[in-house]
Image (tube, rainbow, N blue to C red):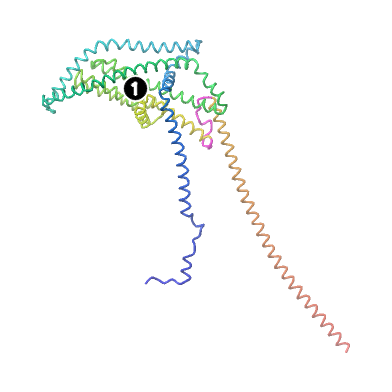
Amino acid sequence: MPEQLDAAQFFEQLQPEDPVAHIDRAEIIGNGIKHLASWCLRLLIIAAAAFVIWHILSQVWRGGLPIVLAIIVCTVLWPPVAWLRKHGIPAGLAAMIAILGSFGGFGFLIWLIAPSVVNQSQTLYFQAFEGVQRLQLWLQGPPMNLDPSDLDDRIDTAAQWLQSKAGSIASEVFSGLGIASSVMVTMLVVLVLTFFFLKDGDKFLPWLRGMVGQRAGWHLTELLTRGWITLSGFIRAQALVSLVDAVFIGSGLIILGVPLALALAVLTFITGFIPIVGAFIAGTLSVTVALVSLGVTEAVITLIIVLLVQQLEGNILSPLLQSKAVNLHPVVVLISVTVGGSLFNIAGAFLAVPFAAMAAVLFRYLHDMTALRAGEKTAAQIRFATTAGSLSGMQNEAVAKRLLAARQAYIRNDEAAKQAEAEAQAAEDTANNSLEKLTTVSKVQHIGGLAFSTITRIGKAGIAAVKAFYRT
């Protein structure tokens, strides 16, 4: 039988717990849901803004591409232009010299590789034909042991598939010609924009500061300058990495006697500007040419050379050069290239990392400004790229000091109010105690007065009685 509880114990268990002993669980859950709803609303607003920006960019992508490409070209050509202008060459002439010099360099490169491409193309065709025959013989032998008739049937099936796709291939060729003409127009626009950017680009920031005002101008000047430094550093570092890849892989191809070795080296340099993916494409093409022209052994050696060079690049050269210029994690780079390539094809893959670097610059600048406002850093602890950025940093530091002083004053006032309240309570307690003491004294005095008056009356009565006794 369970122990019987008397009425007193039963009602004692029904008494509510002390509300000061702990915080109500419902209050904690309610506050958590309130904060979660607040953050969900903010994320929804950010997602809506990102969708609008994405929609606008998808509409103006074709028109904005020449501007972006011109800015990237300017990051490469600006150092020689700045050097020429420093030595007294007018801005327009310096820009023209830099552009013509770059065209001369590309022309020299084409002149250098064109004869080898023309001379070795026919040789490569015959070597490829022989390579296909060697591949057929290898497939017929161990370990594949394919039947020659079955292999011929598969080759005929592939040929019939190509014939059936001839119309679509022709249409793709004609559409490719249209794309090529569009590319030529885009390159012409990029050339014109590059000239004017190199000639008048240094006037943009003063004009921008005059348009948006002093404070916003300081922030924009610092932010755009950081972006320019990051973008130019990325392009130069990637160019150096691509050059090293092209030199080492091209040297290996020349030593092995692979046809079109110089052209493949140039292709390696160009595709090197697409991180991770470009090296894979160039390496695959080099191994394929070595396979169909020289055989399996040379293809394996080419593959080993490509892998060694890419390991040297990925583990030593790229981290050393790109860490200071971009400072992006390889996962971020890979995701950026994948998303950019899937959305905007080759141009998106090429521009993905620069855009990711610009986004990283923006977030780091916002982080620095937030740290200044929070008082976690001082302006002297942040490396600013411009004088305007230093002024903005000192301004934010001053704002942080004012906010901290206001917070401290609020805390002091709150503590003073609590202390005054405690002193008032103590004074009230003292007054109450004094009142109680006074009340007690008054009671004693009243009783004493009554006793005195009683004794006086008794004394008077006694004296009167004595006098009456003597009279009698």
Residue 229: where, in percent of width, then height?
46, 23
Report the number of numbered marks. Answer: 1
Q: Regarding mark 1 in the picture, which secondary structure is present there?
A: loop
Front position in the image: 310 or 61: 61
Question: Along the horizontal axis of the image, is 212 left or right of 120?
Answer: right
Residue 195: where, in percent of width, then height?
45, 14
Q: Let me know if residue 26 is in the magenta part.
A: no
Residue 317: where, in percent of width, then height?
35, 24
The quadrant in which residue 458 appears is bottom right
Front position in the image: 368 or 284: 284
- Residue at the location (21% across, 15% down)? 125
- Residue at the location (46% across, 69% down)? 9
Question: Along the horizontal axis of the image, is 155 left or right of 173?
Answer: left
Tell me if I can see residue 263 in this picture.
yes
Q: Let me know if residue 384 is in the magenta part.
A: yes
Front position in the image: 381 or 207: 207
- Residue at the location (31% across, 26% down)? 311
Q: Dividing the image into 4 quarters, which one contains the N terminus?
A: bottom left
Disc 1 crowd rating (10 Å Cα; few below 14, some 14-19, many 20+) is many
Q: Which residue is situated farthest in the bottom direction here?
A: 472
| Vertical arrangement, residue 409 with respect to residue 172, above or below | below
Tell me if I can see residue 326 in this picture.
no
The quadrant in which residue 71 appears is top left
Residue 214: where, in percent of width, then height?
57, 26
Front position in the image: 325 or 7: 7
As shown in the figure, which amino acid type bears the numbered disc 1?
Gly
Q: Which residues are magenta?
A: 373-386
The residue where tag 1 is placed is 272
